[in-house]
Image (tube, rainbow, N blue to C red):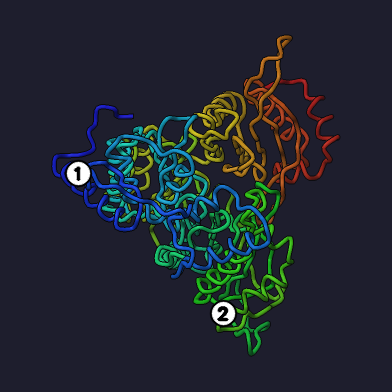
Amino acid sequence: MNQSYNPFDDEQKNYLQGFMMGADVSRAVRGLPILSGQGLKGTSIQVGGTTSAVPEGIAGPERIHREAQDRFLTNKKKLCAEEQAKRDKNPLDMWNEMLEHAASDKFPKGTDVFLFKFQGLFYVSPAQDAYMCRLRIPGGILRSDQFRGVADLAESHAGGYADVTTRANLQLREISPKDGVPLLMGLQEHGIIVRGSGGDNIRNVTGNPTSGLDPQEIIETLPLAREMHHFILNHRELYGLPRKFNIAFEGGGSISSLEETNDIGFAAVKVNEDHATTEVPAGVYFRLTLGGITGHLDFARDTGVLVLPSECVPVADAILRVFIANGDRTDRKKARLKYVLDDWGFEKFIEETQKLLNFHLRKFDLTHCEKAAPADRYGHVGVHPQKQEGLNYIGVVLPVGRLTPPQMHGLADIAESLGDRKIRLTVWQNLLLSGIPDDKVSEATSRIEALGLDWKASNVRGALVACTGNAGCKYAAANTKLHAGLIADYMEERIELDSPINIHLTGCHHSCAQHYIGDIGLIATKVEVGEDEDMVEGYHIFVGGGYGPDQGIGREFKTSVTHEECPAVIARLLLTYHEHRMSEQETFVEFVNRVDMIELNKLYDGNLVMA
C-alpha cells in the first residue's frame, strides 16, 4: 500500500471540514448524534428511544424490505444481525459516515463493516488491515481509458495491483481508510459505479465477453447486461435483498458466461419455423433458469419459460421482488433464492412471478428449441477470428488473475493502437483484446509477452482459477493464489497438456473460484501433519466438475492433501488420465466420469511414475 500518498489536497480538506459541520446540523435536525464534534458545539443532542434510525412507518421503495422483515417479527422470529443492521440504518445513505471515516483515517466497526459493503468497500481484517473494493462492470467490458483509470487508482489509492474475478470484474485491495472515499470518487469520475457491488445486493451482471464479435453467438448480451445494470442502479428497492444475487445473460458465445451458476440465468435459443406457434413465433428467445449456486451443490434449472430479449429485465425485476418478499431474513445460510425454490417448488415461484407482470410467461418445450453451439473450453485464451472479417480477439493469460498498473497501461496501449479500445474481462480471470487486424496480431502478441504476460492456449495458467485466498480474505483457509502459481510452475516443468484442463482453487465454502465445476477443483482446509499434530494449509481435491454440455458437480478424489503435496498429486492424476484414456479425444471429464472413484484411485495408485 502506498503509505506516503496524501489523498486530500487543501480544497478537499476544506470541503470535508465544511461538510462535517453541515452534517452535524443535518443530523441534529433529525435527532441523530453529531459526527465530528466541530459543529453545534455546546449543543445537547437528544436521541429518541427507538433503536432504529428509520421511521417505523417507512414509505418509499424500500418499504417492501421493511414489510418482509415485519412478517418474521410478527411470527416471533428474530432477524439475523445483518437484517437488523439494514433495519436500523439504510446502507445506501451512509456517504456522510464514509466521509467521516476517511477524514478520521479509521475503518468501520461492528455492523458498519457489513453496511459499507453496499458502497463497494470491504474491510477485510484480519486477513488484511485494509479495504477491498469490488467494481461493477456490466458484461465485463470496459473502455481502455477506464482500464487506465483503474490502474492509476490502484497505484495511488490501493496496493498497486488489480485482480480479475470470476464474475468478469475487477477488485482493488490494500486500501487504507483515508483512501476509501477518494478511490470511490475516482472510480465514479471514470464512469465506474460500485454501489451494490457487495452486501445483500445484485452483483456484477455478466454476459459473454465476446458479445458483438463472436461468430457463433445467437444474440449480443452486452446491451442486456448494461440495461440490467442501469435498472438496478436506479431502483433502490433492489438493494438490501435477503442475500446476494447473481444474474447472467448467455448469448451462445464461444466463451461461456456460466449462466447456470447464477440465481437467474438467461440462455439464448432459437425457435425455428417448423416448431413455431401462434404464441411463440419463430425467432430468438431466452430460456429462463433459476437457482444456480454451485457452492451449495446446485446448478440453475430450466423453468420451461421462454422470454423475449425485451422481457428479460422486467422478468428479472419480478423475480427479485418475489425473492425480496419471501426470502429468509433470519438464517443467512438459507437466505439464497435456491432455498425459496426448494421450499416452494418452481411452479409456485413462477406463479408468484407472473402476478407481478403485465404480460404472459410463455411455456415452451426445450426440445423444440435450437440451443447454442457448445462453448470453446479454451476460447478465452489465444488468437481467435471475429465475425468481422479480418479482425481477431486475443485472450490474454493473467497469473491467477492479477495485474500490475504498468501491465494494465500496456494492455490499454495495445487496445488503443491496434484494437477497438475495449478491454473484455472473462469469468476465467483473464481478459480479451478485440478488434486486432490480421496483420497486427503478431505485433500484439509480442507486446503482450513484453509485458510479462502470455496468450498461448498451451499455457497451463490459461485454465487456472484461484480466489483471493487468505492473503486477502478472512474466510479462506489457504493462500490459494500462491498455491495455484506453485501448481502451474510444477506442471509446466513436467507435463505438456494436449487438451484443456480447468483447475480451480477456492479458499472456503463460499466457493468464489467455483471449485465444484472445475475439471479438478480444490477447496482449502487445515491438514494435520507430524507427530506434533501441527496444522498446515491444504486442500480436498475434487474431479469431474463441468459446465454447459459437461455440467456436473465434482466428486471428491482426495481429502486433506497438504499444499506442498498438491502439485505432485495433480500431476500424477493427469499422467494417469493420459495413460488410461480411451483416445486422445477423450476429455479429462469424460475419463473421470467413465471410471468410478474406486477404479480411478486404483489407476492412480498403480501409476508409479511420479511427475
Camera-nearest residue between 397 and 425: 425
Q: Which mark is residue 17?
A: 1
Instruction: Indicate which label's residue lies in the foreground, 1 or 2.
Output: 1
Taking depth in this image into account, of 464 and 161 the one nearest to the observer is 161
Q: Position of residue 480 (x, y in %)?
A: 56, 31
Note whether residue 192 is visible.
yes
Left-right relation of 569 to 381: right
x then y, percent, for residue 194? 39, 52
Query: Which residue occupies the extreme bottom position in the image?
Result: 278
Judge left or right: residue 21 versus residue 120. left
Mark 1–mark 2 Cα distance, whole angstroms, equals 48 Å
Q: Nearer the viewer, residue 529 or 329?
A: 329
x then y, percent, for residue 87: 50, 56
| Label 1 Cα neighbours within 10 Å, binned few <14 / some 14-19 / many ≥20 | some
Q: Is residue 360 above or below residue 323?
A: below
* Location of residue 543 with respect to 236 vertically, above or below: above
Q: Secondary structure at mark 2?
A: loop
Q: Is residue 425 above or below residue 3?
A: below
- Answer with the quarter of the image where residue 121 lies: top left
Q: Which residue is mark 2?
A: 357
Screen quadrant of the C terminus: top right
Residue type at the position of mark 2: Leu
Disc sitting over residue 196 in the figure: none
Residue 451 horizontal/vertical position (percent):
35, 34
Decide if residue 410 is in sight here: no
Q: Secondary structure at mark 1?
A: helix
Q: Amino acid at mark 1?
A: Gln
Q: Earlier in the sequence, mark 1 or mark 2?
A: 1
Q: Residue at x 54, y 59 (%)?
A: 241
